[in-house]
Amino acid sequence: MQSERHAHLDAVRARIISDRLPHAEEYGILGRTGDGTPCACCDKPIISAQRLYKVELSDGRAFSMHLDCYDNWRQESLSIQQA
């Protein structure tokens, strides 16, 4: 399970570096029930049994994420910014 987490963190980091995902800047976040929207971090659908976190950036872009994916995105984005 730990290796899956590391693989996921690596994938999220790669998406941030390649600009597929933004760096964590000033943003708003809304939570709601999943509706099948694909996650911006892992591409898997966010189903109704899960929470969908919609990250809205100050420039108007928005990204939907699972809770765990949101946590990984924040962690990796902040790690990249501090490097």
Image (spheres, helix red, strand yellow):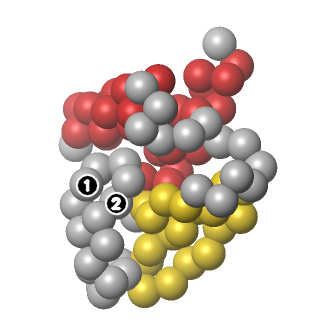
| Residue at mark 1 to residue at mark 2: CA–CA distance | 5 Å
Residue at (38% x, 53% y) in the render: 40
User: Which element is circle 2 on?
Assistant: loop
Q: Which residue is mark 2?
A: 39
Relative to 2, say whether 55 is above or below: below
Q: Position of residue 64 (x, y in %)?
A: 45, 64
Q: Amino acid at mark 2?
A: Cys
Q: Give the left or right position of residue 24, taking residue 68 as reference.
A: right
User: Which element is circle 1 on?
Assistant: loop
In this orientation, does residue 5 appear?
yes
Q: Quadrant of the C terminus?
A: top right
Q: Residues within 10 Å of mark 1 (few under 14, many from 20)?
A: few
Q: Among all residues in the image, which is located at the extreme top?
A: 83
Q: Give the left or right position of residue 26, taking residue 77 as reference.
A: right
Residue 78 picture quarter = top right
Q: Amino acid at mark 1?
A: Asp
**Numbered label attached to residue 43:** 1
Residue 38 picture quarter = bottom left
Residue at (37% x, 81% y) in the render: 34
